[in-house]
Image (cartoon, rainbow, N blue to C red):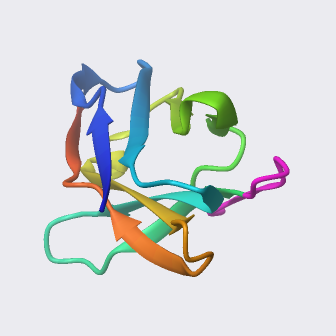
Amino acid sequence: QVQLVESGGGLVQAGESLRLSCAASGSIFSINAMNWYRQAPGKQRELVAAITSGGSTNYADSVRSRFTISRDNAKNTVYLQMNSLKPEDTAVYYCNAEVAGSSGLYYDYWGQGTQVTVSS
């Protein structure tokens, strides 16, 4: 079994920064893509940022140039550095990863979510 545990959420004012972390643990042989999603009240979950095992990244247009995704493969951890936060960034942020165990088959795993609230 694999667990993803997020940390780093909180309440900040507009213009401030936060750094989210997500550590994967358990029966891990390989991790492919690691992603951050978010879901605001009354809205669908959306992809915020993605990073491949090789380090290629992709961002939602709404966060490009403000957020930076990175990963430490040795620690099975993905980060999301969020700068110049806006009230519309308020949401629950979820970590997602494609993880293979000893079988070599990749499965999708999700963290429990961490709340980010940005006040104006």
Identify the residue at the far left of this view.
Answer: 41
What residue is drawn where x is 75% and y is 58%? 52
Q: Is residue 18 left or right of residue 7?
A: right
| Residue 92 position (above or below residue 65) | below
Q: Nearer the viewer, residue 55 or 98?
A: 98
Q: Is residue 83 rendered magenta in the image?
A: no
Q: Assign the N terminus to one quadrant of the image.
A: bottom left
What residue is drawn where x is 24% and y is 77%? 43
Q: Is residue 53 rendered magenta in the image?
A: yes
| Residue 101 position (above or below residue 56) | below
What residue is drawn where x is 62% and y is 75%? 104
Q: Assign the C terminus to one quadrant of the image.
A: top left
Examine the residues drawn in magenta and state their main secondary structure: loop
What residue is drawn where x is 55% and y is 67%? 102
Is residue 49 visible from the viewing direction of this image? no
Count of picture labels? 0
Locate residue 77, reporting x and y percent: 52, 36
| Residue 104 position (above or below residue 36) | below
Locate residue 63, reporting x and y percent: 59, 50
State the extent of the magenta-drawn residues as a range.
Answer: 52-61
Q: Is residue 120 left or right of residue 46?
A: left
Locate residue 42, reporting x and y percent: 15, 77
Question: Which of the 4 image quarters holds residue 57?
Answer: bottom right
